[in-house]
Image: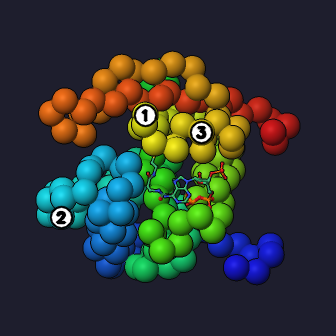
Amino acid sequence: MSAGAPVTHRVATPQPGAAEALGELWIAVTEAGGAVDFVPGADPGEIRALAAATIDDVRAGAAHMIVAGEQTAPLGTVLLVPGRGLVAHRADVQRLMVRPDHQGTGLGTALLAAAVELGREIGAELLTLGARGGTPLPAFYAARGFAEYGRLPGGVRLAPGDDRDIHLFARPLDRSGR
Ligand SMILES: CC(C)(COP(=O)(O)OP(=O)(O)OC[C@H]1O[C@@H](n2cnc3c(N)ncnc32)[C@H](O)[C@@H]1OP(=O)(O)O)[C@@H](O)C(=O)NCCC(=O)NCCS
């Protein structure tokens, strides 16, 4: 990618095919061992259904979506879910994923930075996220401005007898742009 090129953009309105495209990205990421709600061998229909529900949330304004590439052929994506009521000052970063053949090229870092920027734009004062233990993900977020504030022991069950902690991260956003 060329230096300075905008590689990510916010999805204002999901286009026809966006849900299917997200589903195929999510399935590929899962089969490559990615830690986004599923494990390899998961029912593709279940992933496609969750992708469709995710796009419905974006269409309804309940979640904001950023993609790298085209929304109908995404190289990667990330969701930002704003809180409501007493947690309306927070937003949760979810489902950061990059196509397996593009991982390690900076797209995940760019998507996360775009989510942080979008968080500022929507007025969020605190970003949160959870990362699966036993993976490189906690170190990935810790190196990118997020601070681990706790762990949920055994918060995700990959298989019977293989529970993993969820590492809980937060990042305050201030008005000075840091
Ligand atoms: C985690 C992920 C989004 C990072 O995006 P990326 O474009 O591969 O990462 P970048 O090139 O921007 O940065 C590379 C960093 O990611 C880390 N990383 C984590 N998983 C990786 C993977 N599968 N391949 C390459 N790098 C990975 C590297 O250790 C490296 O860390 P460092 O620079 O701090 O040493 C991406 O690898 C991915 O989609 N993984 C599978 C899905 C997933 O687990 N998502 C997390 C949900 S919480």
| Mark 2 or 1: the one toward you | 1
Q: Secondary structure at mark 3?
A: helix
| 151 over 48 or under it: above or below | above
* Amino acid at pointer 3: Ala
Above or below 175: residue 104: below
Quadrant location of residue 170? Answer: top right
> Residue tagged by mark 2?
44
Query: Given contact means CB atoms under 8 Å apart, are the residues at marks 3 and 1 in contact?
Result: no
List x then y, in percent, for residue 105. 63, 68
Q: In the picture shown, does residue 114 fall above or below 87? A: below
Say which residue label 1 marks.
Answer: 133
Left or right: 24, with 87 as reference point: left
Q: Which residue is mark 3?
A: 139
> Tag 2: Cα neighbours inside 10 Å, few (<14), some, or many (≥20)?
some
On the rendered structure, is 112 left or right of 23? Answer: right
Q: In percent of the image, x 36 and y 20: which residue is there? A: 153
In primary-sequence order, the first of circles 2 and 1 is 2
